[in-house]
Image (cartoon, rainbow, N blue to C red):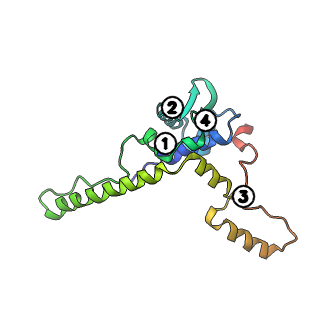
């Protein structure tokens, strides 16, 4: 089953632009970060522009956020790249002659609508600023929930006399893709 990563990739682009506002960000460079092709990045950036989240000029590799990060929500990004597509989908190919096949889809529809409303409400409360703040709390190379524990384990193994990576960081030096 194929699932969409358009929202994740769109937020990746928005975060990258927020973290490196003074860098040339071509679709090639962004595609390298996302590990995809530049045409897909341009497609997402076009949708983000149309959604009022991004400002860019064709031929100039300096896209910018159209709003402050605290004014861009996950729901804004979702709507920009996915439109009104639901998060969950019913199987419309069940056997119409089967009572279970028909009725289970009707039951699921109501639950899926409830889930959609709850998800959209939650997404409306999460901003790009929240995402960036969480990003800054994540150590490079370690998933955030385990960062502090990982640091404690490493510190125990190597002792207190050695300085190790703290579990907070800023955007850091320019990524390698800018050095090409």
| Badge 1 density bin: few <14, some 14–19, many ≥20, Cα 10 Å | many
**Callouts 3 and 1 close, C-beta under 8 Å:** no
Residue 161: assigned label: none
Residue at mark 1 to residue at mark 4: CA–CA distance: 21 Å
Q: Quadrant of the N terminus?
A: bottom left
Q: Is residue 176 above or below residue 105?
A: above
| Badge 3 density bin: few <14, some 14–19, many ≥20, Cα 10 Å | some
* Mark positioned earlier in the residue sequence (2 or 4): 4
Q: Quadrant of residue 157?
A: bottom right
* Mark positioned earlier in the residue sequence (3 or 4): 4
Residue 124: image location, x then y, percent: 47, 48
Residue 173: image location, x then y, percent: 76, 45
**Callouts 3 and 2 close, C-beta under 8 Å:** no
Residue 28: assigned label: 4
**Callouts 1 and 2 close, C-beta under 8 Å:** no
Q: Is residue 11 visible?
A: yes
Which residue is denoted by mark 1 in the rendering? 77
Q: Is label 3 in a helix, a strand or a loop?
A: loop
Residue 87: image location, x then y, percent: 38, 51
Of 125 and 4, nearer the camera is: 125
Which residue is denoted by mark 3 in the rendering? 168
* Mark positioned earlier in the residue sequence (1 or 4): 4
Which residue is denoted by mark 2 in the rendering? 49
Q: Is residue 13 visible?
A: no
* Mark positioned earlier in the residue sequence (1 or 2): 2
């Amino acid at each position: 089953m194929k699932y969409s990563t358009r929202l994740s990739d769109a937020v990746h682009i928005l975060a990258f632009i927020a973290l490196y506002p003074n860098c040339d960000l071509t679709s090639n460079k962004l595609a390298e970060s996302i590990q995809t092709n530049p045409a897909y990045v341009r497609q997402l950036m076009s949708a983000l522009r149309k959604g009022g989240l991004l400002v860019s000029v064709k031929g100039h590799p300096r896209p910018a956020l159209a709003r402050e990060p605290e004014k861009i929500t996950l729901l804004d990004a979702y709507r920009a790249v996915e439109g009104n597509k639901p998060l969950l989908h019913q199987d419309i190919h069940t056997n119409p002659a089967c009572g279970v096949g028909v009725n289970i889809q009707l039951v699921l529809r109501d639950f899926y609508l409830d889930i959609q409303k709850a998800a959209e409400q939650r997404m409306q409360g999460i901003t790009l600023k929240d995402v960036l703040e969480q990003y800054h709390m994540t150590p490079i190379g370690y998933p955030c929930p385990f960062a502090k524990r990982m640091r404690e384990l490493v510190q125990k193994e190597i002792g207190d006399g050695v300085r190790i990576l703290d579990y907070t960081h800023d955007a850091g030096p320019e990524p390698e893709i800018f050095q090409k």
